[in-house]
Image (cartoon, coloured by chain):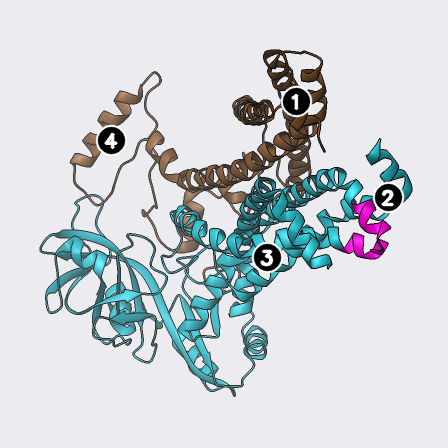
Chain colours: A brown, B cyan
């Protein structure tokens, strides 16, 4: 080993975790800058310089100072904290875009599943509906009944889906947190996600109900009760 | 007979069959995409490494190639000793750093490789040559600083933060414009002879960032890895397999993601086929009882329903593969926008294994989905069912 130095461990550092570091699991060491310069044999050279503005400085001040420093046109570049966050979170922006794309495909598959089931469930009611029409129940009442059944099934399905989603979120976090040795959460159940999924489910379910009701009511009562 | 009945039943409820086939197609497309994604980047990385032809990389212990600025001292001497080892065809040091290159249109930082002339394949020049015996510039940098082959550029080791002036500078003639393996999107890269780069940086003792090793045909890369590790305790050697194992942990997210979505798509396909066939069998109980009454055995009735599930899967599978292949391109494009991903790597990699896995899983799921309705059809009582039907 060259330029080896003896160092005393002052502390075991467990700082705030960053999602980007979770999968890497790199060993990390923090030391004072002069000590690192001594080990490297390179002095007065740094990767970056951080600048803390005076208390109360707003975003506009940060941008102005950035522009002033950039105007020096020396051999460095300058970024505000906001810009750095944007640059370093690019990976998560991409992953989030990928999740949305996959979500769209699963919603499409789930949508077909939902429409199929709803149509089948309501088609099963064909004979009962035929009998009701034979005893004089109006098409309007039967249409409303079909829609009520569709709404009930959809609501029950949405509730079960949200519960299943909550269980999956719990399962994913219970599995991945110990696996990567982190307290970061890998999945969260956001109210917006619940509202979107439930809203979409209700829309698809009621849509399927309308189609099934129209198909059923188009037939005569005798056709409906026939085998 | 059973085949005829299965086809007839599926055709009879055409709209229902179309819906279930559409659902299984989308679920199957997702399944195929997840089969391509699970380990796709690793396969793509392995394949790109394999194409370069270097079986072993030697680095400072605890590091990976290009993961650190730390240099391997006496790399040339180490490379010579490795090259003399039985089974080794070539061992050559590679130096990687960042330099500043100035042309008529301005100055730009560039990733720089110092290579010996015998190191081939990392760069492909426009002329088709793949060796470096002068300054080779990638297209991105050439456009940025406004140079072409034959022009002279100023190459500097550093820029003074105090004055903005370049440090140690040398004038070099651009020998060629070339493409570099593993270039990131918009990365500016140059390569020059190793000795020139060491001189420019003022490095003594012929240090390098890592050593690339090419084994002779039939030689075992793993035994060379073990020999290097035993001979130089301060060094690590990685075969392609070893490198893939190192990146495996970082790519585990995609493996788990694909496993979870594979499970979800199989569940959707299973429930869809199971539910539709259960309802279909429920509607046809009288017909099935009649078939039993005229002599169709219980096992053939069960087979009939299982066959219907398998047919739905079989019809959906080619469409699922086609749809999956089509949607994998935009999904791959989304993920390749991740910073730090070389442009020649892909996340979704189609392979015969991915196709076979998708076909097998869809067929098994379709058949298993039909198991419950098949069980209902198999256990129906002929007399009671017929009696109920005529009431």
Q: Chain of mark 4?
A: A
Disc 1 to disc 3: CB gap under 8 Å: no
Q: Which residue is mark 3?
A: B358
- Residue B341 rendering spot, x and y as whole percentages: 40, 53
The circle on residue B380 is 2
Mark 2 vs mark 1, foreground winner is 1
Bin the neighbour count of mark 4 within 10 Å (Cα to Cα): few under 14, some 14-19, many 20 and up: some
Name the image quarter holding the C terminus of chain B.
top right
Mark 2 vs mark 3, foreground winner is 2
First reached walking from the N terminus: tag 2 or tag 3: 3
Q: Which residue is mark 4?
A: A66
Mark 1 vs mark 3, foreground winner is 1
In what element is the residue under mark 1? Answer: helix
Residue B192 is left or right of residue B7, and the answer is: left
Q: Which residue is mark 1?
A: A221
Residue B344 among those drawn in magenta: no
Bin the neighbour count of mark 3 within 10 Å (Cα to Cα): few under 14, some 14-19, many 20 and up: many
Mark 1 → mark 3, Cα distance in angstroms: 45 Å
- Residues tagged by mark 2 and mark 1 found on one chain of the structure: no
Give B77 or B360, whichever is nearer the viewer.
B360
Q: Chain of mark 2?
A: B
- Residues tagged by mark 2 and mark 3 found on one chain of the structure: yes
The magenta region covers: B288-303
Mark 3 vs mark 4, foreground winner is 3
């Amino acid at each position: 080993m060259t330029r080896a130095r003896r160092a005393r461990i002052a502390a075991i550092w467990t700082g705030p975790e960053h999602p980007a570091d979770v999968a890497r699991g790199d060993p990390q060491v923090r030391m004072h800058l002069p000590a690192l310069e001594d080990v490297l044999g390179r002095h007065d050279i740094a990767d970056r310089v951080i600048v803390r503005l005076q208390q109360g400085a707003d975003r506009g001040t940060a941008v102005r100072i950035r522009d002033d420093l950039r105007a020096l046109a020396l051999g460095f570049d300058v970024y505000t904290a906001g810009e750095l966050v944007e640059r370093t979170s690019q990976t998560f922006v991409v992953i989030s875009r990928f999740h949305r794309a996959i979500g769209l495909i699963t919603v499409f598959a789930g949508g077909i599943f939902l429409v199929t089931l709803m149509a089948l469930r309501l088609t099963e009611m064909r004979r009962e509906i035929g009998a009701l029409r034979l005893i004089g129940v109006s098409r309007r009442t039967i249409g409303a009944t079909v829609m009520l059944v569709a709404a009930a099934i959809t609501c029950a399905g949405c509730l079960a889906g949200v519960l299943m989603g909550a269980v999956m979120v719990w399962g994913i976090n219970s599995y991945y947190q110990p696996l990567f040795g982190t307290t970061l959460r890998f999945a969260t159940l956001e109210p917006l996600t619940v509202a979107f999924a439930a809203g979409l489910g209700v829309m698809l379910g009621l849509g399927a109900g309308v189609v099934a009701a129209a198909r059923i009511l188009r037939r005569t009562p005798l056709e409906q009760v026939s085998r | 007979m059973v085949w005829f009945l299965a086809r007839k039943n599926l055709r009879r409820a055409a709209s229902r069959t179309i819906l279930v086939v559409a659902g299984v197609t989308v679920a199957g497309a997702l399944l195929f995409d997840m089969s391509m994604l699970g380990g796709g980047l690793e396969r793509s990385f392995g394949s790109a490494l394999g194409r370069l032809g270097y079986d072993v990389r030697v680095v400072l212990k605890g590091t990976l190639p290009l993961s650190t600025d730390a240099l391997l001292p006496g790399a040339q001497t180490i490379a010579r000793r490795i090259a003399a080892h039985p089974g080794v065809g070539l061992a050559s040091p590679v130096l990687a750093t960042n330099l500043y290159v100035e042309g008529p249109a301005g100055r730009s930082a560039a990733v720089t490789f110092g290579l010996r002339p015998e190191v081939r394949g990392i760069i492909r020049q426009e002329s088709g040559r793949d060796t470096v015996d002068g300054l080779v510039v990638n297209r991105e940098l050439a456009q940025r600083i406004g140079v072409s082959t034959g022009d002279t550029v100023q190459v500097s080791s550093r820029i003074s933060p105090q004055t903005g002036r370049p440090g140690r500078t040398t004038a070099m003639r651009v020998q060629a414009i070339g493409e570099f393996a593993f270039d990131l999107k918009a990365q500016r890269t140059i390569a020059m002879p190793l000795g020139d780069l060491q001189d420019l940086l003022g490095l003594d003792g012929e240090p390098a960032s890592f050593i690339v090793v090419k084994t002779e045909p039939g030689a075992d890369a793993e035994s060379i890895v073990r020999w290097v590790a035993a001979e130089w305790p301060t060094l690590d050697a990685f075969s392609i397999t070893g490198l893939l194992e190192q990146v495996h942990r970082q790519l585990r997210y995609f493996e788990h993601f694909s496993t979870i979505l594979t499970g979800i798509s199989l569940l959707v396909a299973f429930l869809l086929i199971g539910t539709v066939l259960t309802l279909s069998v429920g509607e046809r109980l009288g017909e099935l009882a009649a078939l039993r009454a005229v002599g169709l055995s219980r096992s053939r009735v069960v087979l009939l329903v299982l066959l219907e599930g398998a047919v739905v899967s079989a019809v959906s599978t080619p469409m699922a593969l086609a749809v999956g292949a089509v949607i994998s391109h935009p999904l791959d494009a989304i993920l390749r926008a991740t910073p730090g991903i070389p442009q020649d790597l892909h996340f979704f990699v189609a392979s015969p294994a991915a196709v076979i896995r998708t076909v097998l899983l869809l067929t098994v799921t379709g058949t298993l989905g039909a198991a419950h309705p098949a069980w209902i059809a198999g256990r129906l009582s002929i007399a009671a069912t017929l009696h109920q039907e005529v009431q």
